[in-house]
Amino acid sequence: MPRNTIQKDEAGAQRSKGHLILRLLSYLKPYKKDTALAVILMIIAMIFGLVNPYLLKIAIDVHIKNKDVLGLVWLGLILMVINLVTWILSKIRFQMVAKITNTMLVNIRQELYTHIQKLSFSFFDSRPVGKILARVIGDVNALQNLFNQGIQSLIPELLTLVCSAVFMFLLNVKLALACIFLLPFLSAAMFYIEIASRKRWDIQRKKRSNLNAFTHENFSGIKVVQAFGKNHSTSSTFKSMVGEMAYAFTNAIRVNEFFWPVVDMSWSIGIVVVFYVGYGLIKSHEIEIGTLLAFSMYVGMFWRPLMNLSNFYSTLTTNFSAADRIFDILDIHPDLTGKPNAPNMPPIDGAVTFDHVSFSYDEKSEVLRDVSFFISPGERIALVGPTGAGKTTIVSLISRFYDPDSGEVLIDGKNIKDVDLESFRSQLGIMLQDTFLFSGTIMENIRYGKLDATDEEVIAAAKAVEVHEIIMKMEKGYHTEVNERGSRLSLGQRQLISFARALLADPRILILDEATSNIDTQTERLVQQGIEKLLHNRTSFVIAHRLSTIRDCDRIMVIDDLGIKESGTHQDLMDQKGCYYDLYMTQYRFLKEGA
């Protein structure tokens, strides 16, 4: 299977950590009150937790030293109440944070999905579906740990770190300085590890995205893979890509694993130094043993957040690339944008004008050059010509899947750039050669043309295109599941169902792009009456290589050489004996010889 479009890693904008954090925190704005309450609960629980070592100091240096049993009992009861309140507050806080983070993830995923739906066809032309799925599913899931640890760990750990440092300095300045003298070295080491780790995790995510794209494409085209006997080849490619991803993961983990040993060793050295200095202070009677024990507990409270923050920092660098890739998509602006507050398209009569339209897909090779024509409301137009001449391009411009490089496309005299896109497309009916059916029932797929249609309207549309009897012969009739892309149905059945869907939409402008290419001759005769009903009193554009199906069109346009080479009725063009005549006679002789 070709891999050129899959192997290529996307080059996204590398945003700074500060920019990413601020942008991610912006999703907390709708939940400011809940977040503030959760933070308050964190602070209360943290303060209660920080009181424990100081009460231990009092217990040893005062009550035990003075043999005050009653005071010791009361102090114990106070400790029990404090710890019980801390546990209750922590439980409430965890539940609140879980609700906030899950809602934020839902919002981000919804925003990403909605944004992708608005992007132009050029976005989808340049990216495999698997890579897009990796953003919506994998990269958003990667943010869950980021948000959970960010709110659950970052704020309380930072507060604990600062407050425990304050308590240490209040107890004894010399011990506090002895505890934190390694911090500059630890900070430098973590800074270096973060840079190396982020680069490697970015590579790993790109490799995973490539694997997702390849797997999706391979399974989507499994019939081609098996038909050409490429199972072994694709398995080898898959194995190679899995190996690349595994190597990238191992490479990233290898760097990440330096976080914990560096912090752990700093903690161990700090404890040794504190007890060494503390022993000297006790000998010189500057502190008592209770103070040293309380201080050792604060040392644990000081270094434990550093360890947890280093773990969070590791998660942060691991998932920064996921956030980067999500924002890469969110920062893409659709090529097709309407004017702010553009008015809705009024009911369409069906007049279509191309005014000196030129277009290219890659800004290099033109497909259309200075094309102009006018179509009257209700006129039936056929577009014929060689493959790649620009027939589908013309109907894509009418549908505003793309905008022309120059010139204007007008509907009823209005430039389609100046009206609301959704209100405009809702009045179009488009049936493509590559018919697409969604997972679900036949009834649901036909109703997609008009979501509020009744069952009777759906059945009436199916009868009009002669597919009702075919549907009724299926196991569950209109409630038969078609599976993904309609895999349970033949190509002809899929097209007939999509034809009923287009009829149900009752469009003012209808586009049929090779709509009958996969219907056999006998079935085609059955749907002619339905086609006539569908085309009646509507402006329609019909693209067909089978020229016998377009003889009754009001006008036939031969598209070639970047524009319209010939135009007229079937008889006019046959009398001219030009391009259309040659195409028609060649096809006629071919069919005659085949018969």
Image (tube, grey):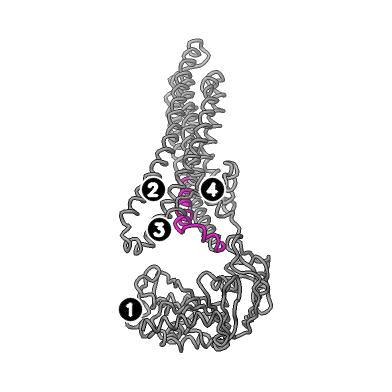
Q: Eyeballing the image, is 95 above or below 503?
A: above
Residue bearing the label numbered 2: 241
Residue type at mark 3 is His
Q: Quadrant of the C terminus?
A: bottom left
- Of 55 and 45, nearer the camera is 45
Name the N-terminal-most of marks 1 and 3: 3
Q: Is residue 127 highlighted in magenta?
A: yes
Give the alpha-carbon distance from disc 2 to disc 3, as whole Å: 13 Å
Extent of the magenta region: 118-145
Residue bearing the label numbered 1: 476
- Dot 3, how many residues are within 10 Å of its Cα: few (below 14), some (14-19), or many (20+)? some
Q: Is residue 288 highlighted in magenta?
A: no
Residue type at mark 2 is Met
Name the N-terminal-most of marks 3 and 4: 4
Residue bearing the label numbered 3: 216
Name the N-terminal-most of marks 1 and 2: 2
Direction from residue 26 to residue 213 in the image, left or right:
left
Q: What is the number of the mark on residue 588? A: none
Residue type at mark 4 is Ala
